[in-house]
Each structure stands twice: as structure tokens, then as C-alpha cells.
Amino acid sequence: MVLVTGGTGLVGSHLLLKLSMDHEKIRALYRSKDKLAQVKKIFSYYSDNSTTLFNRIDWVQGDILDIPSLENALKNITHVYHCAAYISFNPSDFKKLERINREGTANIVNICIAEGIKKLCHVSTIGTIGRTLNGEQADEETEWIRQNTNPYAITKQLAELEVWRGAQENLEVVIVNPGVILGPGFWNSGSGSFFTTAAKGYNYYPPGGSGFVTINDVTNIMIALMNSDIYNERFILVAKNLTYEQILKKIALAMDKKPPTKALKFWQLKIGKIADIIKNILTGSPRTITKNTIYGLKHPTTFNNEKIKNTLGMEFDSLDEQIKFSSKLFISEHS
């Protein structure tokens, strides 16, 4: 039986769908029952038999910071997909990020070792891949430096160190480092915000760019790696490097909206950072523009995906098809 943590998130819900379709014996960890409705909705995007697929999963309430609940969830498990994480780029959230992302991962690793788990797949981020300053693409060996890095990436790098500690204690591990994951259903967070933004028809787009990948590729690769003899390796999962102008244009056109045509200037972003701080203080809304955010926009990095392509002998899915599919669902839910 396999265990999926973070089963109610974008990666976790899509991973559970594929595992259920493959008739795997699955257990999934969840924190609150209200999040399960979102998983059912995700399943319904892809199957008319979504209720049956959902009911194949052994749902266990728990938390990666609650060791007794984790010990219970890991009983009779052979493989663990660790998708759970807390995402925030607000520096004031560092302690919470560190506790959930590093300490939570340490708990997973420790119990995997104690229970004799065969293999652990840890979902990280390209934020833990080092930046290049010479225009070359970054790969899995590019040195990572903490300076000018957002707090989320810092805590995910600390989480990776916990996974490598487990590898030293004979736990077989694989780490995936996805770029921005394009997929439907979570419109107010992560890549979903690109669809929400494009739908509003803004004229401006941010400078810089990132690596992008479809949710289908991410989950297929995770399963392929877990079913293989490959272990103690990490892999960048990026189908294509795009500017934010390019990705927003693609999404806007898929929604039949006017694409943005004007680049935000860095002085505008600095003013936006101040407004963002004030809004955060007054309303408690998440920070979206920080000093490290602006640095990342000013110094974008592109990513090399050859390692995973050569290891699995694969090619990545079309981003355009995923954008069309997700845009159609967005429109149907917001019309």
C-alpha cells in the first residue's frame, strides 16, 4: 500500500487520481474534511466514475507535525509520496514554513526509517535549484545559495537535507523539483493565480520568467520513479522555460481575453512592495511582492530538463494543451 501526504493539494489530488485509476492500494493523509470536496471536484474533471475512484482511497485524518497520527498512517505502507507542504513567500511566515516543511519532512523520514518503508518520493521545488548568472541553464548540480532566496525555498532546501539524511540511513529516496505546475482546480493559489490574473485582462505583466510543467507530467514522473530501481537522485521537472509575458499571453488567448502588452517596471514593483506590506498589515493578506521576489524577477534562471528525459526516456507534454484544458474548466466555473 502507498501513502500520499498532502492529498488535498494540486499535486496530491492528481496523484491520487492516477493511483486510483491504476487500482493501487492507497492511503491518503488529510487534515480537515472540508478539503476532501476539492479532491472530489478534481476527480470529476477527468472521470465520470469519480466517486468510485475517490472511495478506493483509505482516507486518514492526521498531520505531518503530529507524530502519533503519522505512525498510524504509515502502518502497513511500503511506499510514501510526500506532497504536503506550506507555501508562503512572506518573510514573517518563516517559522511556520520551517516547522511544516523541514520538521514535518523530518518526521516523515524518521517514521519511514522506523517502519522499514521501501521508498520515499519527496516533492520539492525548483526554488532549491541554484541560480546561474551567466545565462546558462541550471541543472541538478548547480550550487544553491541561500542569499536572495525566498523563505519557502529556504525551508524546502532544509527539507531536502532531511530526505538526504534518510538516504544515508538506507532509506531509498527520490526528489522531484517541479517548476510552476500547470493544472486545474486551485485557482487562488500557485499556478492557478495565472489563470485568475489572465481572466481579468490586465494590461501589465511582470518581468522575468520561470520553468513550467504540466500536472500530468509531474504525477506520471513521480509514479515512474517510484516503480523503478532509481533511488537517491533528484530531478528537475520543467517542460519549458517561458517568460511571464509568454505564459500569460497563452492563457489569455485560451480564455479569449486580451493578453497583457506592457511590462511592469522595477520601480513600479518597488512601490507595489510597499503597498503589499501595508495591505498585509491591515488585512493579513499574503505577501506577494517581497525583496526576494523582485530579485528573482530581475535575475531569472532557466532550467535544464535533460536528466529526467534521459533517465526515463521521455518527452514532456504540451503546455498549450494543458492551458487549453485548464482554461476551459476555469471559464466553466466562473461564468
Image (tube, helix red, strand yellow):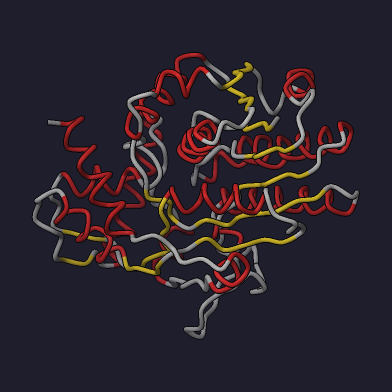
31 relative position to 120: left or right: left
Q: Residue at x 33, y 40 (%)?
A: 184
Position of the N terminus by quadrant: top right
Looking at this rendering, what residue extends furthest in the bottom direction?
Answer: 134
Residue 231 at x, y percent in the picture: 76, 57
**Percent x, y for residue 57?**
57, 22
Q: Is residue 222 above or below residue 87?
A: below
Locate the C terminus and report the quarter of the image it occupies. Answer: top left
Residue at the image point whose x is 55% and y is 40% from the top: 92
Q: Is residue 210 above or below residue 56?
A: below
At x 74%, y 24%, the residue is: 70
Indicate whether 54 appears above or below 209. Answer: above
Asked whether 273 or 310 is in front, the reply is 310
Q: Residue 220 versus residue 240: which sits nearer the camera?
A: 220
Q: Which residue appears at 67% of the width and 61% of the height?
A: 234
Task: Give coordinates of residue 24: x percent, y percent.
Answer: 61, 32
Q: Position of residue 76 (x, y in %)?
A: 79, 25
